[in-house]
Image: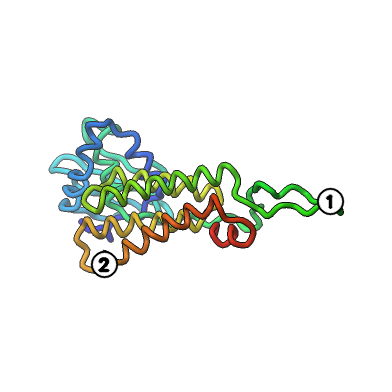
Amino acid sequence: MTTAQLPPVAPEVTATLVEDLSPRLRKRLDAAVTKLGSRPAHRDGDTVTIAVDEETDLRLHAPGGVVTTADAITCGCLLAPACVHRAAAACAAPTADPAPEPAGQPDPPVAGSASQTDDTVSAPDVASPAQRAAADAVWSAAAAVLEAGVDGAGAVAQAALLRTAHTARLQHLPRVAGAALSVVTLLRAARAGDPSYRTAGLVTALAELLGTARRVGTASGAELAAVRG
């Protein structure tokens, strides 16, 4: 099986499946991802089937080409759905690009955006408390990756970053969310020994992510609009 054979999985789906694992299974997750990579897989319409072993199949159902719910990944093993295989499949698959926000979606409320009167001038827009919290969570997850290094930033650390990326997107911070997904993609390439991977690319992506996430809490006005993306 290769990553290209698997349908993209929404970031929040991967995060949920990893979060639902027991501590014992989380310790086995990286090995399970590696093992799945050596197993045969085939596609039938919107479903990709992986042979976990001679008697057990794992299926990823991706209507529209993307796995959008945790229930769309099923396993036939005795421990399912609480097995490590479902999370491993999600971690082995490419991360889906976030769905675009609907056209005409109103901008999120921001601090300092109260209506102004003829006698007063409103303060520059700043990030809302929820946006600052989302950006801080991304920064913390990215800092944990930086501290762990490529060898230590396995599937669990990546899932934590995916969760914060999803939260950032929900808080209308697409630039931060996209930067987090880029770091996860590069981490996976590094750990898989992808010949196209370059360390400099990961360093640049991490620096961009950390810097952008930090600026959400300090930027205002036009700078904040650029940081949001």
* Circle 2: element type: loop
Q: Is residue 58 above or below residue 211?
A: above
The residue under the point 46% across, 47% down is 166
Inspect the image, locate mark 2, and give the three-letter code of the amino acid beneath it: Arg
- Quarter holding residue 225: bottom right
Q: Quadrant of the C terminus?
A: bottom right
The residue under the point 54% across, 50% down is 217
Q: Is residue 156 above or below residue 25?
A: below
Please tell me which residue lies in front, 168 or 96: 168
Determine which residue is flagged by label 2.
198
Total labels: the figure holds 2
Q: Residues within 10 Å of mark 1 (few under 14, many from 20)?
A: few
Q: Is residue 212 visible?
A: yes
Query: Hey, which residue is sitting farthest bottom in the picture?
Result: 196
The residue under the point 28% across, 61% down is 4
Whole-percent x and y of residue 140? Answer: 40, 45
Determine which residue is flagged by label 1.
117
- Quarter holding residue 52: top left
Whole-percent x and y of residue 116? Answer: 80, 51
